[in-house]
Amino acid sequence: MSRRSMLKALAASSVAVGLGAAVGTTAGAAVGSIPGAAPSGGRNRLVPLNKLGIILYSVRDKLSGANSIGFRTLFEELAAIGYSEIEFAGYTQGGAGEITPAEIRQLLDDNGLRAVGAHVNLNPSNIDEQLDIAETLGMPHLGQGGAVTNNNTVAGWGQAADNWNLMGEKAKARGIKLYAHNHAGEFGFLSDAPNTRRYDFFMENTNPDWVYLQMDVYWAHVGAHQFPGFRPIDYINANPRRFPLLHLKDGKVNPDVGNGYNYVEFGVGDINFQEFLSATRDRGQRFGLWEQDDASTNPAPGYERDSLGNAARSYEAIAALRG
């Protein structure tokens, strides 16, 4: 039995059963491909399996509150699905009890998983501590999920760029790439320089050897809807080295909401990821991390609510993408 077949077999027995979750579909349905997705066999994967990961924010319900299943069980489930890379969104596990970064690292190793990055709130005062944690977990990247500043003036973004250069230089000295994640607002304009996008200003004023970026493809499309005049793919192709990670988050077009899109499970939305990933000049070279902000409450049509079910089906849909 190949590793891939083994993982699918494990997923069939654990995703719907291992947690004791009351889901209305069979385990086989939980891990099955979205109807209409490309077949899982073949070559030219747009996201190689050894670079296909998940940000734990998508399954945060499994790590919070009294009913937390804890990192141990969660990692077992994600490894069974087939994920290889983990991006953290905090290092706590709710009612499952206290846990240290060293203990988390052991659980990753036990399940054949790798910590690829994390979203934490970074500043010059805590960067050394956060880099210590990243080293313990074996992360090649360390990032922030929120905006680098909420002061949308030239001075505000200039100060943010200075801070990130300082932190990025420290990260590079320890062999770690520091990265900033985007939402839609970064593609808006500076309040006192209305022809300059905040994202452009940040890129131009940070050292590309010290400061990297993680494009959230969904939010970049929302940004293009709200602040037109750019294509998200052009940022990556113009600066391929600066984007080592992507958030692969799907969206359904909805002209009645300000974002222009609603969150949906990967593979049932309107963002053409096959076209997007095929258009990257160095496709297959960066990490693709699945995210769905409302995975615990918004499954694909016909499925019961369960963030791990969404995670399994989204894995299959991403793995099926071919160039």
Image (cartoon, rainbow, N blue to C red):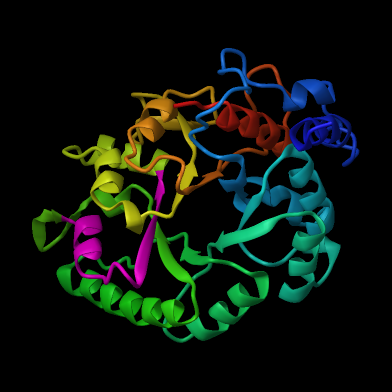
Span of residues in magenta = 197-216
| Side (left or right) of 87 relative to 238 | right
- The quarter of the picture where the C terminus appears is top left
Q: How many labels does the image show?
A: 0
Above or below — where is 286 with respect to 147? above
Residue at 67 percent across and 48 percent down: it is: 84
Residue at 43 percent across and 55 percent down: it is: 244
Whether residue 230 is in magenta: the answer is no
Any part of residue 297 in sight: no
Any part of residue 200 in sight: yes
Asked which quadrant contains residue 155, the reply is: bottom left
- The quarter of the picture where the N terminus appears is top right
Q: Which of 59 and 79 is in front in this view?
A: 79
Above or below — where is 108 with respect to 290? below
Asked which quadrant contains residue 36, the reply is: top right
| Side (left or right) of 212 relative to 137 | left
Above or below — where is 316 with respect to 159? above
Q: Nearer the viewer, residue 39 or 315?
A: 39
**Residue 217 location (% of width, % of height):** 40, 41
**Residue 168 location (% of width, % of height):** 38, 76
**Residue 316 location (% of width, % of height):** 64, 29
Residue at 55 percent across and 78 percent down: it is: 130
| Side (left or right) of 271 relative to 132 | left
